[in-house]
Amino acid sequence: MKLLFIGPPGAGKGTQAARVADRLGIPHISTGDMFRHHVSTETDLGLLVDSIMKAGEYVPDEITVEMLRERVAEPDAAGGYILDGFPRTAGQVAALDGLLGEDGLDSVVVFGVDEDALVERLLARGRADDTEDTIRNRFNVYQEQTAPLLDTYGERGIVVTIDGLGDIDDVTERILKALGR
Ligand code: ADP
């Protein structure tokens, strides 16, 4: 099963992607986590993306696509996976279509949550890129570049919209139920 989780910053998609992946016994592939790992271990890629992430901008597609391409080719990904945070530009959708074909994803799980609740959650989380300016910019970038992907996947009829508010366990069950699991 190949799934994609999409949502604005703070929607809880990372937490839920990890939980659902665990329940389904497939890997959770988060490009944000992969980049953060590069930053914390100070690889060349990490040094390159550090300032981009701190500004709340997106890493250029060439870099992100290549990293993802290598990751999904690993043996543990052969039986499916949950993509978290990739694709999030039209260019990345095209690249993923090239890798998997247009019918490669089984479902796209979209998180709907109220914007004020999101800002509150992010400020409480306190990650390095969770300052107020960065959060605001990440929202703008999400609206401009990632929200349009919902139309693309909507036209393919594979979007499942989830209410991301409420108890963490309840949200996980909600997702599994919506996926028919
Ligand atoms: P959030 O959903 O809270 O923004 P992520 O962990 O998914 O958090 O991403 C953090 C940052 O990592 C992004 O703001 C961006 O700089 C970078 N990043 C992650 N995934 C991508 C991607 N697919 N394309 C470009 N940049 C990405």
Image: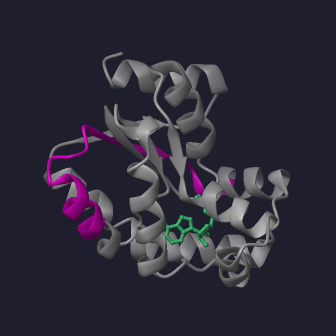
Q: Position of residue 127 (x, y in %)?
A: 81, 59
Name which quarter of the figure residue 169 lies in. Answer: top right
Q: Is residue 171 visible?
A: yes
Instruction: Give the residues drawn in magenta, as a range.
Output: 93-116
Q: Position of residue 96 (x, y in %)?
A: 28, 61
Q: At 31% from the left edge and 18% from the top edge, which residue is drawn?
A: 180
Say if the magenta span includes residue 99: yes
Rendered-image quarter of ligand 1: bottom right
Q: Vertically, is 120 above or below 24?
A: below
Name which quarter of the figure residue 48 lies in. Answer: bottom right
Q: Position of residue 104 (x, y in %)?
A: 20, 46
Q: Is residue 110 left or right of residue 31?
A: left
**Quadrant (top left, top right, bottom left, bottom right) of the C terminus:** top left
Give 180 or 70, whichever is nearer the viewer: 70
Total numbered labels placed on residues in the image: 0
Q: Is residue 129 visible?
A: no
